[in-house]
Image (cartoon, grey):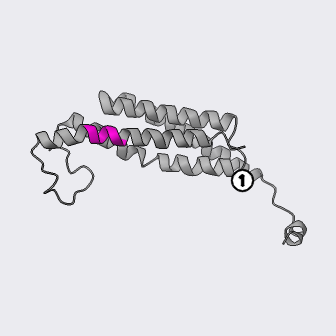
Amino acid sequence: MHSEILAPIVALVAWTLVMMVWMIVVRLPAMKKAGIDLSKARGGRPGALDGVLEEKAQWPAHNYIHLVEQPTLFYAIAITLALLGQGNGFNATIAWAYVGLRVVHSLVQATFNKISVRFMLFALSSLALMMLTAHAGMAIWNAQPAPLVESVASR
């Protein structure tokens, strides 16, 4: 049987891929409208198209970047909880809350992009991430190391 916390990990990866497609679907026509010829375009950096493309066309791209920033910490701590045998029950519920908040954050940012709403969602998701991290820390702290005799005998 697998750890329940793995499902929200898969869900957030899937959502990130949805946002990647959304970004492409919105940006390609905006780039064409701005006269950008992709066959001649070279290099680039995040934000290079800010001020070149209409603002709303950049919102899904900005969100995609956000989904490959802080959620990497979520993936690490969720996998840690799964490996510790602590990825079920309340921790899985917190993980789902984190994913739900990140999805709503994406929808806000890619549509009407009100910063006060986005910040509230970011803060709540960060709180969920902090809770998961604290629970992983407590599980590690409270874990009883194998006695030296058993460790040596099992080799």
Q: Residue furthest left?
A: 35
- Asked if the magenta segment contains residue 22, the reply would be yes
Is 122 situated above or below 80?
above
* Range of residues picked out in magenta: 20-25
Front position in the image: 76 or 41: 41
* Residue at the image point whose x is 46% and y is 47% from the top: 70
Could you say where residue 98 lies in the image, as x and y percent from the top left? 53, 36
* Residue at the image point whose x is 12% and y is 39% from the top: 33
Image mark count: 1
Q: Is residue 91 left or right of residue 109?
A: right
Q: Amino acid at mark 1?
A: Ile
Is 61 situated above or below 141?
above
- Residue 43: tell me if it is visible: yes
Is 86 situated above or below 116?
below
Q: Which residue position is annotated with label 1?
A: 140
Quadrant for the N terminus, please: top right
Q: Is residue 103 left or right of residue 63?
A: right
